[in-house]
Image (spheres, grey):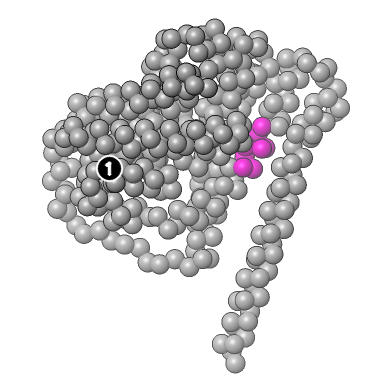
C-alpha cells in the first residue's frame, strides 16, 4: 500500500512539474516576443528620444538585444545541459578510442559540439584522449570544434543574425575541425607531443560514471545554466554594449572600406588581429552583428570571429603544457589556413 501511494505521489509530482515547465516556456515565449516593442516604448515613449538619433538607436539596440540574448542563452543552455549529460568526458573518450582517421575526425568534431569544454580543460582532455588511445588528428578535431562550435556561439548567432548565418557557421566550423584534424593526423606529429604525456598512454584504466535518472539530467541542465550563463552574462552585456555603440554611432557602410569584399587583405588581417585577442562567443558575436550592420563583409567577420574563438592566445599558452612548439605552430597554421579559405569563400559567394 505504501509503495502504491509513493508511486502515485511521484507520478503526480512528475505531472505537476511537466505542467509548470509548459507554463514557464509559454511565459518565456510571450516575454521574448514583447522585447522589441518594449525597447521602442522605453526609448521613444518613456525617455522620448527623437527617432534616428545616434543615442536613441544605440540605446534601443542595447535594451532589445541584452534580454533577448540572455533569454535565448538560458533556454538553450538548459536543454543542451540535459543533452550533455549523455556525453560525459569518459564516454566521449570511449567513443573516440580506436576510431580511425576520417570517420574518427567526423565523430570528434560532432562530439565536440555537445561535450563540455573550455580552454582551462584543454590539457586534461588532451591527456585523457592520449591515454585512451585516441589518434592525434581525431583529438584535434574535437579540440577545435568544442570551443568554436558550441551552443553559446550558435544561440547568439541565431538570436542576433538569424538561422541562416548560424547554420553557415555550424557547417563551416565543423568542416574546419574535421579537415584540420585529418590534416594534422596525416602529418604524423605525435613526436611533438611532450614526452611526459606519451608516457601516460598506458596509465590507469578509465572510470565510467553511473547511469543518471531524468531528474539528475534536469539538474544537470540547471547546473549548466548556473555555470555557463553565470560566467558569460557579463561578456554578453559588454559585447552588446560595444555593438550598440557601433550600431548607433558608426556611419552606414563605414566598415565596407576596411572589411568589405573588395578589400583583399581584410580576411588575413582579421585572422591576424583575432588570434591574440582574448574573448569568447558571448563577447564577440554582438560586435560581429554590429560590424555586419555597418557594411563589413560576412566572410571577413566570420574569419575574425573564428580566429578569436578557435585560436585564442590563452588556449595556445595552456596547450603548450602538453604540446611542443612545432605542433602548436602546425595547429595554428592548419586551422588558420582553413579559416582564411572560409573567409574568402563567403566573401566570394555571399
Say which residue label 1 marks.
102
**Could you tell me residue 217's position as x and y percent?**
50, 61
Q: Secondary structure at mark 1?
A: loop
As drawn, the residue found furthest toward the bottom would be 1
Direction from residue 212 to residue 331 in the image, left or right: left
Labels in figure, total: 1
Residue at screen point 17% across, 54% down: 203
Direction from residue 161 to residue 264 in the image, left or right: left
Extent of the magenta region: 65-72
Direction from residue 200 to residue 295 in the image, left or right: right
Is 173 within the magenta? no
Quarter of the image where one finds residue 4 = bottom right
**Could you tell me residue 348's position as x and y percent?**
47, 18
Residue at screen point 43% across, 44% down: 113
Could you tell me which quadrant the N terminus lies in?
A: bottom right
Q: Main secondary structure of the magenta part?
A: helix
**Could you tell me residue 317's position as x and y percent?**
30, 29
Confirm whether residue 128 shows in the render.
no
Amino acid at each position: 500500500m505504501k509503495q502504491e501511494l509513493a508511486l502515485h505521489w511521484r507520478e503526480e509530482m512528475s505531472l505537476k512539474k511537466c505542467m509548470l515547465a509548459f507554463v514557464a516556456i509559454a511565459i518565456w515565449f510571450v516575454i521574448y516576443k514583447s522585447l522589441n516593442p518594449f525597447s521602442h516604448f522605453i526609448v521613444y515613449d518613456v525617455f522620448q528620444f527623437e527617432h534616428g538619433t545616434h543615442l536613441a538607436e544605440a540605446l534601443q539596440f542595447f535594451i532589445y538585444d541584452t534580454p533577448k540574448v540572455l533569454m535565448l542563452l538560458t533556454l538553450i543552455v538548459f536543454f543542451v545541459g540535459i543533452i550533455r549529460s549523455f556525453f560525459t568526458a569518459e564516454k566521449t573518450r570511449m567513443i573516440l578510442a580506436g576510431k580511425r582517421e576520417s570517420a574518427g575526425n567526423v565523430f570528434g568534431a560532432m562530439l565536440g559540439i555537445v561535450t563540455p569544454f573550455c580552454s582551462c580543460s584543454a590539457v586534461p582532455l588532451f591527456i585523457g584522449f592520449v591515454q585512451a588511445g585516441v589518434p592525434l588528428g581525431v583529438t584535434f578535431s574535437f579540440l577545435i570544434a568544442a570551443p568554436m562550435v558550441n551552443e553559446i556561439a550558435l544561440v547568439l548567432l541565431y538570436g542576433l543574425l538569424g538561422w541562416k548565418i548560424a547554420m553557415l557557421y555550424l557547417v563551416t566550423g565543423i568542416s574546419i575541425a574535421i579537415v584540420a584534424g585529418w590534416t594534422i593526423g596525416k602529418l604524423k606529429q605525435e613526436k611533438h607531443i611532450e614526452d611526459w604525456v606519451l608516457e601516460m598512454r598506458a596509465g590507469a584504466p578509465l572510470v565510467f560514471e553511473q547511469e543518471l535518472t531524468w531528474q539528475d539530467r534536469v539538474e544537470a541542465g540547471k547546473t549548466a545554466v548556473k555555470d555557463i550563463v553565470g560566467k558569460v552574462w557579463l561578456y554578453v552585456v559588454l559585447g552588446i554594449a560595444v555593438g550598440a555603440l557601433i550600431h548607433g554611432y558608426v556611419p552606414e557602410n563605414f566598415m565596407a572600406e576596411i572589411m568589405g569584399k573588395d578589400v583583399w587583405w581584410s580576411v588575413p588581417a582579421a585572422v591576424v588581429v583575432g588570434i591574440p585577442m582574448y574573448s569568447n562567443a558571448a563577447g564577440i558575436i554582438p560586435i560581429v552583428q554590429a560590424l555586419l550592420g555597418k557594411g563589413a563583409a560576412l566572410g571577413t567577420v566570420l574569419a575574425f570571429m573564428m580566429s578569436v574563438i578557435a585560436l585564442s592566445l590563452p588556449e595556445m599558452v595552456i596547450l603548450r603544457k602538453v604540446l611542443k612548439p612545432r605542433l602548436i605552430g602546425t595547429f595554428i597554421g592548419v586551422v588558420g589556413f582553413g579559416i582564411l579559405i572560409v573567409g574568402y569563400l563567403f566573401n566570394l559567394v555571399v
